[in-house]
Amino acid sequence: MSTCIRNTLIIGLGLIGGSLAKALRQNRQYGQIVGYDRDPEETKIGLDSGVVDVAANSLVDAVSDADLIVLAVPVKAMEKVLVDIAPFIRETTLITDVGSTKANVVEAAVRVFSVIPPGFVPGHPIAGSEKSGVAAADSTLFEKHKVILTPLAESSSKAVNVLTHMWESVGAEVLVMTVGKHDEVLAATSHLPHMLAFSLVDTLAQEQDNNTDIFRYAAGGFRDFTRIAGSDPTMWHDICLANKNALLAQLDRYTAGLANLRAAIECGDSETMLGTFTRARAAREHFSRILSGTAYSQLMTNQQVIFRAQPGGSVSGKIRVPGDKSISHRSIMLGSLADGVTEVSGFLEGEDSLATLQAFRDMGVVIEGPDAGNVTIYGVGVNGLKAPPGPLYVGNSGTSMRLLSGLLAAQAFDTELSGDESLTKRPMGRVADPLRLMGAEIETAENGRPPLKIKGGKALKGIHYDMPMASAQVKSCLLLAGIYAEGETSVTEPAPTRDHTERMLNGFGYPVSQNGSTASVKPGNQLHATRIDVPADISSATFFMVAAAITPESDLTIEHVGINPTRIGIINILRLMGANLELLNEREVGGEPVADIRIRYAPLKGIHVPEDQVPLAIDEFPAIFIAAACAEGTTIVTGAEELRVKESDRIQAMVDGLKILGANIEGTEDGAVIEGSELSGGTVESHDDHRIAMAFAVASLRSTGTITVNDCANVATSFPGFVELAQSVGIKVEREEG
Ligand code: NAP
């Protein structure tokens, strides 16, 4: 962008003015950099130290020549400077300032100029230090920092563009907001923390007897927190007066919060204390994710990860794989709605279940953890949720959004459910439509997509819903809404889907009846807190089951695996292929059946996989393809067309990879025909699909050469610690980062 600025004048050569001058002088896009300070000494230091090109002796001359003027004086001095320069400003001159408060600068400008010039755009760089004066000027001060511009109704778009470019040219990111919003935001994020730091240090310093001890023993945390108490007292005095109203409002909120905490400490109210601490601890990370609109998974995929697996080995030992995702979600939801304290262990600390956890925290539920899979939930009862402070952000989790929408449709307060970019493309009409039939009021973006705006205070009525498409999420959403609806809510599914919600409701003592393919709930019951040891995810266990099943001399036990009848296709299929697989120690946890699975090597044979088992094992096919390639004879998979629209086209990905490893395999529309044979080594693509990646790592147990699998970063989202666990049982796989 050509700026047409030949002369830039910085008035006030202190830390901020000097730093900007120095940075602009270095980038050479803003003409000659002229500096002026009321203290000629400062101006001279600026010139001698190369901060400015020219030191102005006469303010009048400098203003008359300037195309761009930056006021970098204390906020209290702004009005006086404006009075001094107003008569000499040319019509085309652009003017901005760097003051930490904005309303008072604008008020001063209104008093000084009869008409605000179109070139005037107030601004504020959110960068600084405790130092002051031109000697502290630092040309990198604004790099990767934010600058807020607060254009006025009179400001021209050209002026806004040029000033935006100016700040960007020194490495800053420019945000635009109104003057009022600026002062409110800054009162909370900068001015209030400075008041706390000043007041805390002052209070402790005035303690008569042991003030030296306090500072002597002060730990790093105290020093970090009070660092800002070293800031310039005069500047902060001015800021307090300039932003008085907004700052007082924030101080009042904070004082009330502190009083609340004090009362909790006084009467030993652990729930309030833990609520404050756990929410605060989670808040920083949560808000960073909202601001970047990302999920953990997306951050991680920037990294190139490959698996390199050496051939051979056998598999033995006792292991536990990560917790089931569906059950982890529901443990948080139902634990929050229960009366009493629910202890959860084995919780999957993945992106999606953490999103659900945060949503309930936002609705006032005190949740401790997760800490090594342990979570403690202080349930608030069916009617105890509170209005969240803002939209509930669920990252990339479709499960959270769909299940929560049912609960939220029945609450007394309004809510908004939002997610990351990829979730924002997924259709929510399949839950919004039947909820509307129950009387819910839900607004969606175009084509039923998120965000969902859900109106509170609606009395829902029970309905009978025949699901047009089998979906556990839709069924769960309606059953959760049914807890609050008048009369019975029942859902009939066209094909069996996962029934974790029904089972866990029963586990919490809330009756759900099941009549054939119809599940129904009635309102008016309570959920009772319980202990949930989240079963290990059978989909994650599958890779190890197949590993032991295909490898001579293997004997592996996988503990505490969920064997929900809607998920055990893999057990049935492996048994049909001749696997030696035992279910030990079968028991029930929170309504869910679990068992330890012991699997020993036995030669596998090819089969035609029964189509009725396909939906019960839909996520397990990448591993089943490996088992088939290591079996004797032909395995035929049909009726599995859904595999083509999973995280990748799983049929194609497995066919391509197995061909590279020398297998005799042909893909079909809805499955594949796989001949058992010896596997060689080779490099295969996972297409960023975690299950494809893990399946090929397991294949190395029967390959004659090294198998390299590309793009394995996503494995960490569903199976954190896969490589370490695989190594611990004897699979010779290494993770390499590129
Ligand atoms: P500073 O280092 O004290 O610099 C201010 C300079 O302006 C001083 O050299 C001062 O001279 C001079 N000055 C005062 N009145 C003047 C006048 N009427 N005419 C010409 N020069 C005058 O302060 P700073 O930290 O750079 O702050 C400058 C502005 O930036 C303030 O409005 C502040 O709110 C804002 N700001 C500061 C920070 C920060 O962290 N420091 C961050 C963002 C924004 P004397 O020394 O003789 O008074």
Image (spheres, grey):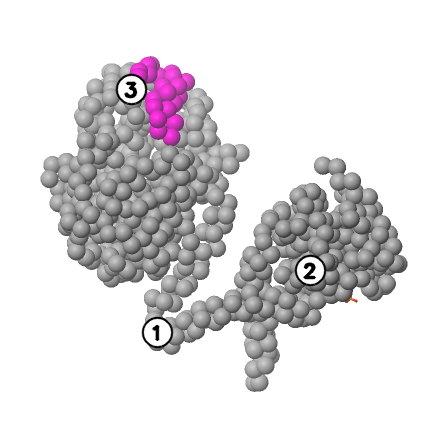
Q: Is residue 420 magenta?
A: no
Tell me residue 527's x, y (percent).
Answer: 20, 56
Q: Is residue 671 magenta?
A: yes
Residue stretch rendered in magenta on the structure = 644-672
Marks 1 and 3, how far apart in space? 62 Å
Which element carries disc 3, helix, strand or loop?
Answer: strand
Which element carries disc 1, helix, strand or loop?
Answer: loop
Marks 2 and 3, how far apart in space? 74 Å
- Quadrant of the image for the N terminus? top right
The residue most toward the bottom is: 209
N-terminal-most mark, 1 or 3: 1
In the rendered image, the vertical position of residue 607 relative to residue 39, given as above or below: above
Q: Residue at x 27, y 42 (%)?
A: 436
Mark number, residue 110:
2
**Which residue is the site of mark 1?**
268
**Which residue is the site of mark 3?**
671
